[in-house]
Each structure stands twice: as C-alpha cells, then as structure tokens.
Amino acid sequence: MADQKRLGVLGGGQLGKMLALAAADWHWPIHILDQSADFPAAPYATHFRKGNFKNFDDVYQFGKTVDVLTIEIEHVNTEALHQLQKEGLTIHPGPAQLDIIKDKGLQKEFYQKHTIPTAPFQLFADENALRIALRKGALKFPFVQKSRTAGYDGRGVAVIHKQDDLDKLIPGACLTEELVPFTKELSVIVARNEQGEIATYPLVEMEFNPEANLVELLLCPAQVSEEMVQKAEKIARNVIEAFDICGMLAVELFLNQDGEILVNEVAPRTHNSGHHTIESCFTSQFQQHLRAVLNFPLGSTRLKNPAVMLNLLGAEGHTGPAYYEGMEKCLAMEGVNIHLYGKQITKPFRKMGHVTIVGDSLTEARQKAEKVKSLLRVISQS
C-alpha cells in the first residue's frame, strides 16, 4: 500500500461527508476544515478542524497540516492556496483554475479562448450597466442574467423575459446569455489524475425544479443518441485538459434544438449530478476523486444498472427540525437507496439528501422514482 498521505478537504458539507465515507473503505486519513462540528462531514472525518475556508489564515494553517489538499466547494480562499502551492503543497484542483472557475465571466472567456462551445454572452460591471445596455438596444429580451461570483445551487441566476421582470435583476458584476430554447440539460462527470489519465462517467440528463432552479430528477443513461453521447464526452475531455485539472470536473451542458451541445458551466469537484454513481457504477465519483488527487489509477466508470437520482429538497412551508415522512415505505422498495445528509434544520428547497433508484431498465427505475417522490417528504417537526 502506498504511503497514506494526509488528505485535507476544504468544506464539511454533504460532499465532504460522502468523500470521507469513500476514504473509510481504504481506512485513509481525511482531514476536514469547516465552521462547525455540526456539519454533515464532521463525524466522519479522521480529523475535523474548526475554521472558515474563506479566511486566509484558517486555510493556510490547515494546509500546513496535510500532504494533499482538495475541496468540496470552489468558493474558498485561493490567496492562501497560492501561497501554500508556492511552498510546495500539492493542491487539486489548483488555485489558478479555481480563480477562473469561481468567476463565471472568466469561465466564459476561457471557453471562448479555447474554442470550447458555449452560448454567446455579454459581461457587465453591474445591473445598472445591464439596464443601460437594454435602453441602448445592445441587449434584448429575453435573457438570462448570472452573477459572476458566489452563485451555486440555483442561486445567482435570474431569467428576464420582459421589462416587468427587471426587479429580479441580481446586483453586482454579472453576465447575460440570450434565452435560447434547449431540449435537454446534460452533465458529464470527468476525472483526471496527475499522470493525465482521463475517465468519463456515462452522460446523464437532468430535470430541474422550476421554482428552486435545482436538479430534482437525474436520469442515467441520458436518453440521447450515441452520437450525442460521444460528442458530450469529447467536450468534457477537452475541458478538463484545457483547465489542466487533476481531480473531478462536472461539465454541465445544454443540448439545443439544432443538435448543438454547449457548455453551460463547470464545477471542479464531486457534484450532485454524480451522486447516483455510488450505486450505479463500478467506481463512485467520491472514490474516483480520491484516486485522482492521490494519483492512483482511475477506476472503471462503467454503468452497472440504469439509475434515477432524486434530490430530497425541504418541503415548501417547512422550516425547523427535519423529519422524513414516508421513509419506511420507501425503504421497503427494492433498488431504493436513501442518503440523508444529516442537516438538522430543513428549509424550503434546501438539499437534505438524495435517493438513487436502480433498476433493470430506466423505465422501471423512473416509475419507482416517481413513487418515492410522492411518498418521501422532508418536513419540519411540529
């Protein structure tokens, strides 16, 4: 067995928890930095350190205690990471890549520079500059506005159809894209290790909750032609190589009505669109992330069973201690795998867990998923 390098993770949410559970299979020491021991990953870390991953000193001091440093969220203090990297610490993904990916404007310019297909865009200093462009006719309705920084999990996005929607504009630096109809939203999870070995997971398609703009249902494999599958996988490989990323990269894609596949955005970490891999693939995205950042051979990404993944979102009108209604009925169903994140308080549309349903066919898995969706609710205890 290779020397067990101390692996540090910035972030102790559900992704950190599932990463720690994967590390436990190898009895691999994992160190996690986040603000509270009540967060999902803390009980599963070999070492938990209280601190803020957005604070220079906390990140720097934490980095001095580990051999390899990675993330579960990209919105971390990269100044500290640049300094640690100068001092010789192995960091995956690197701070230079994070600086680009954290800023959706820089992301879009990166795709443009590297001839990676993406939707046309405009950058604005703030929402006032956007309004001026509208008045001058340089921007037309309808369009999508995205905050350049700090947006994730459906936040930082506004869909503007007409003048009356302008009160929805997000303040601050932003970009806009023309609101173009697309037929499917797709995602490819791709992994790369230090040796340049690359592995892609089967293409998935996503269905979103229209109110929360969060993935509600994920289907694997995606219901598209083999030609589209090959095209999406090639784009994902090109993107991870262009970024020179070691680790996992979720490449979110749009399939438009002309059969074009466009890159929407990326996440340089394990991702919601890869949760199903725990049950459906030979190697989960979490174990694959460990393999990639520790420079081990990548595992097989082959699909064992068709799968549907359902996000468990907090029910509307419920805020308070979480209660999982209908859980016993769902546990009685074959192929239903429930993952609860351990968040004590539920809020409307908060990600509280996910359920992966596997079956002999995608149709069978989807039918079970619809039943689970009708039975399992995250509500607050009265």
Image (spheres, rainbow, N blue to C red):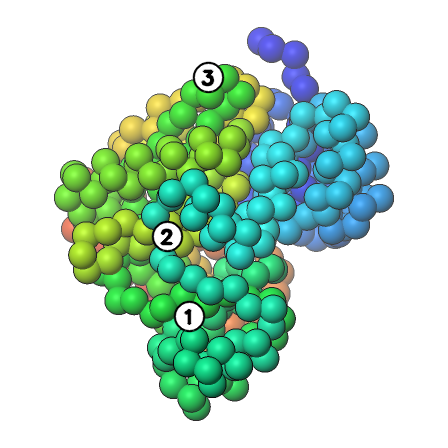
Residue at 57 percent across and 76 percent down: it is 129
Q: Residues within 10 Å of mark 2 (few under 14, many from 20)?
A: some
The residue under label 2 is which amino acid type? Answer: Thr
Residue at 79 percent across and 50 percent down: it is 55
- The kind of secondary structure element at disc 2 is loop
Could you say where residue 13 lies in the image, as x and y percent from the top left?
Answer: 61, 49
Q: Of 56 and 314, which appears nearest the observer? A: 56
Depicted 361 relative to depicted 342: above or below: above
Residue 307 — which label? none
**2 or 1: tag closer to the N-terminus:** 2
Q: Of 321 and 194, which appears nearest the observer? A: 194
Depicted 49 relative to depicted 84: above or below: below
Q: Give the quarter of the figure containing the C terminus.
A: bottom right
Q: Of 85 and 286, which appears nearest the observer? A: 85
Q: For the image shown, how many numbered marks are present on the structure?
A: 3
* Distance in Å between CA atoms under marks 2 and 1: 14 Å
Q: Which residue is mark 1?
A: 144
Q: Which residue is mark 2?
A: 118
Q: Which residue is mark 3?
A: 297
